[in-house]
Image: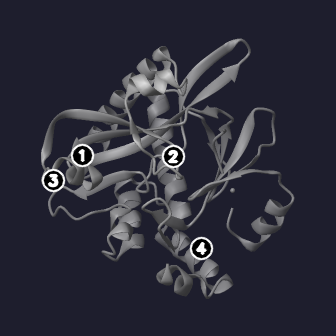
């Protein structure tokens, strides 16, 4: 299984039809890249929660997530974290390296929240004594079950040295992101990342793949505790688009809010019934 995803204007849709689709996930789409060993990753506005039980659309989300993920991937590259990211192609697309995804979701938790609080009866918002890493098997059919490292190794989903690399990188990413978000008044509660195997000649390297955005992070405003992530969609808190834009604004990656709004409006006009359908699901 490989990683990555495509644009949003009408002209872009005609271009997409001429591309070779590789994979379509919940929030992104992958197309064959222009060069061997590359893929085009497209960020969609689609939103899902609870393993696809809840679906909807967050207008402009794909544009914002593209920007945020690009910024974070570049910063992580600067501190020596290898990633799949090559460059941004347009408002919704990135050129990325084709990798073989390790079938594990890696969750790093700094604060008790979400399913963690439910499973262990811990009050949401309680600071954990140290970052806790959980591994989940990437399987919607099975409900993304939590797995012990020994199980991942036994079923050869990952080798022992790969899990070492993944754990080490996940903790380094957590340290960096915690400081990055703290600097803009945001508390990094937890986040989910994915890793892939990059094959180059006779070597195989574990690299960070997928994305890092409000879709896969829990982000709370430090002063107010206001949620600034996909929990606003999960819990029907409203103002989802505004929260995503605020995160991008604080990170300084939103070139112009009007650009995102214009894209969202254009998409809404093209699909006038999308919102109504999403509310019924």
Q: Please give the residue where the numbered disc 2 appears in the rendered image.
A: 211
Picture coordinates of residue 71 (x, y %)? 48, 45
Q: Please give the residue where the numbered disc 1 appears in the rendered image.
A: 182
Label located before the other in sequence (2 or 3): 3
Label located before the other in sequence (1 or 2): 1
Between marks 2 and 4 in the image, the one whose residue lies nearer the viewer: 2
Q: Number of labelled discs?
A: 4
Q: In which quarter of the image is residue 224?
A: bottom left
Closest to the observer, 20 or 90? 20
- SS for tag 1? helix
Between the residue at mark 2 and the residue at mark 3, the CA separation in whole angstroms equals: 25 Å
**In this rendering, is residue 82 above or below 192?**
above
- SS for tag 4? helix
Q: Is 192 left or right of 222, judged from the image as shown?
A: right
- SS for tag 2? loop
Picture coordinates of residue 69 (x, y %)? 49, 48
Label located before the other in sequence (3 or 4): 3
Q: Please give the residue where the numbered disc 4 appears in the rendered image.
A: 263
Label located before the other in sequence (3 or 1): 3
Between the residue at mark 1 and the residue at mark 2, the CA separation in whole angstroms equals: 20 Å
Closest to the observer, 187 or 231? 231
């Amino acid at each position: 299984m490989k990683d990555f995803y495509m644009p949003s204007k009408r002209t872009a849709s005609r271009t997409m039809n001429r591309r070779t689709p590789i994979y379509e996930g919940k929030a992104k789409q992958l197309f064959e890249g222009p060069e061997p060993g590359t893929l085009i990753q497209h960020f969609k506005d689609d939103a899902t929660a609870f393993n696809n039980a809840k679906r909807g659309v967050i207008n402009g989300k794909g544009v914002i997530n593209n920007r945020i993920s690009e910024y974070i991937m570049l910063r992580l590259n600067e501190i020596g974290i290898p990633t799949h990211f090559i460059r941004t192609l347009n408002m919704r697309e990135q050129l990325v390296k084709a990798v073989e995804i390790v079938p594990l979701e890696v969750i790093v938790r700094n604060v008790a929240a979400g399913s963690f609080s439910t499973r262990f009866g811990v009050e949401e918002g309680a600071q954990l004594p140290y970052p806790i890493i959980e591994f989940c098997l990437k399987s919607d059919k099975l409900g993304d079950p939590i797995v012990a490292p020994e199980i991942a190794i036994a079923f050869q989903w990952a080798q022992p040295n790969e899990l070492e690399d993944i754990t080490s990188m996940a903790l380094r990413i957590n340290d960096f992101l915690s400081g990055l978000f703290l600097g803009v008044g945001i508390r990094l509660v937890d986040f989910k990342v994915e890793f892939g195997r990059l094959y180059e000649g006779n070597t195989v390297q574990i690299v960070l793949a997928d994305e890092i955005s409000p879709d896969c992070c829990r982000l709370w405003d430090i002063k107010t505790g206001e949620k600034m992530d996909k929990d606003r969609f999960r819990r029907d808190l409203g103002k989802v688009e505004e929260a995503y834009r605020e995160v991008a604004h604080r990170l300084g990656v939103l070139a112009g809010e009007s650009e995102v709004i214009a894209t969202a409006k254009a998409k809404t006009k093209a699909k006038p019934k999308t919102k109504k359908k999403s509310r019924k699901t």
